[in-house]
Amino acid sequence: MNSGEFVLIDYVGRVKDPNEIFDITKEDVAKKEGVYKNEFKYGPVPIIIDADFVLPGLNEAVKEMEVGQKKIVELPPEKAFGKRSEELIKLIPEPRFHEQSIEPHVGEYITINKLRGKVMSIDGGRVRVDFNHPLAGKTLVYEIEVVGKINENSEKVKAVVYYFIGVPNEDVKVEVKEKEAEISFTKRFDIHNEAKQNIADTIIKWAGFDKVRFVDVFEKTK
């Protein structure tokens, strides 16, 4: 695979010890392993080679593969979610949480100052929060299959939309006019401007467009 190529992959991601699945795209395997979630949409996911769509080690592995190939790779922490850092464990005064209408409880994940962490302890009016990623310091094992490539420009646009906001291809309409892409949706979705900006920047950088336009369509109700 070459840098910038759009690729569809299936995978099963496990924590090496104790061999627990933490991420999976294959519905049949999810059911077999007892981790199936009815609300989750299974199926191959689109990535762009070297665009930070997946973990560094996973990107490296896919880059060396061909369509139809399967591979099992082991990712050390430095090529996955990084090593654990004591600097990311913070003591925060409890009133800071109350200022943001947050009631911290030991063992729960909270978001404060746009950072997500796990509450480890509450003592003497101070809250100890671990802002390390839950999988930091873990060795991961991925079973990967490269399902196919995405070559059509309109399909590349849909792939980027799906990656950022999870809207399936059948709900996305794309009009391509030379170096411009126009995006509209068959249903009403509440998409923040920040997400639109990320989508547009990615499409312009990796799909060869100069301009991306989002169109809101309102129709008369029956």
Image (tube, rainbow, N blue to C red):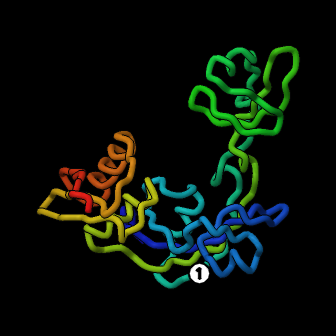
* Residue picked out by circle 1: 70
Q: Residue at x 70, y 61 (%)?
A: 22
Q: Quadrant of the N terminus?
A: bottom left
Q: Position of residue 179 (x, y in %)?
A: 15, 58
User: Which residue is most to the left?
Assistant: 178
Please indicate, yes or no, whether residue 23 appears anywhere in the rendered image.
yes
Q: Position of residue 199 (x, y in %)?
A: 35, 51
**128 versus 33 height, above or below:** above
Q: Is residue 46 left or right of residue 11?
A: left
Q: Residue at x 48, y 80 (%)?
A: 147
Q: Position of residue 177 (x, y in %)?
A: 12, 62
Residue placed most toward the observer, 62 or 119: 119
Please indicate, yes or no, whether residue 48 appears anywhere in the rendered image.
no
Q: Quadrant of residue 72?
A: bottom right
Residue placed most toward the observer, 162 or 222: 222
Residue placed most toward the observer, 155 or 3: 155
Q: Residue type at mark 1: give it.
A: Lys
Q: Residue at x 26, y 68 (%)?
A: 154
Q: Position of residue 131 (x, y in %)?
A: 69, 35
